Image (tube, rainbow, N blue to C red):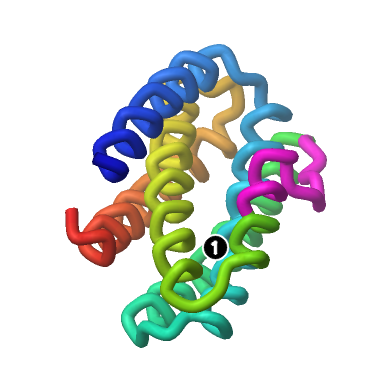
Amino acid sequence: MRVLNIAIAAALIAGASYAYAQQMSSEEFVAMAASSDLFEVQSGQLAAKNSREASVQQFAEMMVADHTKASQELKVAAGEAKVTVPTQMIDRHAAQLQKLQNAQGETFDKAYIEAQLFAHQEALKLMQSYAQSGDSEPLKAHATKASAVVQRHLEHVQKLAGQ
């Protein structure tokens, strides 16, 4: 039942994210994408250190590597679009990271996987919708490229979650 509730909540938020992203400015897109990458890197570092499961640790290490690269690519695209990349997470991502920092053991692994499911569903909708209707060509190109990576991450974390 808990997984069903999470799935329903994620679907509602993803739908809202999609509608919002259709009207999103370059600055808003960059802020959301940068925050998402920061969350992935920092939560991945935490999971690589705190997880008890080798599969979760490997996934976390992949998140750190892939999202560090995505963050660097976002900075290049944002520079071409003349948009400043924030260096802080949005409040929602910071709160999710804090929740993970307070979890331990098996509770940590479950919380990390749930956070990853939600984060990648949200990020995929963000990237796909901005790629379709964004207002900056360099950022649209970045969103298109990032969509494929985020899709692979989502499929991987769904397997970890047993979906």
In the picture of the structure, the residue carrying the numbered disc 1 is: 67
Instruction: Say whether residue 21 is visible.
Output: yes
Location of residue 31 in the rendering, given as x and y in whole percent from the top left corner? 70, 37
Q: Nearer the viewer, residue 17 or 84?
A: 17
Instruction: Residue at 55%, 74% (x, y): give it.
Output: 104
Quadrant of res 101: bottom right
Query: What span is colored magenta in the figure?
Result: 83-96
The image shows residue 140, relative to residue 43, as above or below, that is: above
The image shows residue 66, relative to residue 150, as above or below, that is: below
Q: Nearer the viewer, residue 65 or 132?
A: 65
Location of residue 75 in the rendering, given as x and y in whole percent from the top left corner? 70, 52
Location of residue 90 in the rendering, given as x and y in whole percent from the top left corner? 73, 40
Query: Label 1 sits on what residue type?
Result: His
Instruction: Residue at 40%, 63% (x, y): give it.
Output: 110
Quadrant of res 29: top right
Tell me: 12 left or right of 88.
Answer: left
> Please, what secondary structure does the residue beneath circle 1 have?
helix
* Residue 88 magenta: yes
Quadrant of res 156: bottom left
Q: Which quarter of the image is occupied by the N terminus?
A: top left
The image shows residue 62, relative to residue 52, as above or below, that is: above
